[in-house]
Image (cartoon, rainbow, N blue to C red):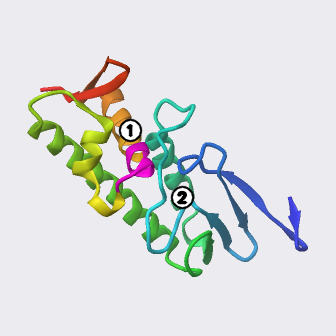
Amino acid sequence: MMLAGREWLAIHTPGHTEDHLCLLDPDSGLLISGDHVLPTITPHISGMSYAADPLAGFFASLDKVANLGTQLKLALPAHGSPFTNVVERVEHIKEHHVERLDKLRQIGADFDRPATVMDIAKHLFSARAQGPMADSETFAHLEHLRLAGEFDRREREGLLEYVRVS
């Protein structure tokens, strides 16, 4: 698409939201990364999605951006200052989510009973970070692990409960 006299490529990058797009000016290496790649914080991955596994979609989207490699010169994020180390930042964001998955595996091993998303979120996020966004992101990560066969899910009294598969 033409914008400001430049030809921009729209790159579908679901994860933060299903319809998220990054815009790339291939001539200058400028990436409008929006909420997909942020310089100092990690994007929220919502569990409230039509996608069965929004975290897997986010990982694939991060890989799509990382594969642009040296073509990327500068990113303009939705939050924070412009930054240059896009591929390195993508790797840090992926590592953060892998660490979250590892922490969920440990939480699941420590629980001696099925637990709700909110119960698990209390152990995954700090007290200050508790709330709907923490619950939503916990759900997205639990669903990723459930679809990988590492957790089971059941419904009891209208609530979803998760338990780690031994």
Magenta residues span: 130-136
- Residue 40 in the figure: left or right of residue 67: left
Q: Quadrant of residue 18?
A: top right
Please name the residue shown 56% across and 59% down the image.
36
C-alpha separation, residue under disc 1 versus residue under disc 2? 28 Å
User: Which is more N-terminal, label 2 or label 1?
Assistant: 2
- How busy is the neighbourhood of tag 2: few (under 14 within 10 Å), some, or many (20 plus)? few
104 in relation to 71, above or below: above
Q: Position of residue 120 (x, y in %)?
A: 25, 42
Q: Magenta includes 135?
A: yes
Looking at the rendered image, the quarter that the N terminus falls into is bottom right
- Residue 160 in the figure: left or right of residue 44: left
Q: Nearer the viewer, residue 132 or 28?
A: 132
Magenta stretch, overall SS? helix
160 in relation to 98, above or below: above
- Residue type at tag 2: Asn
Residue assigned mark 2:
67
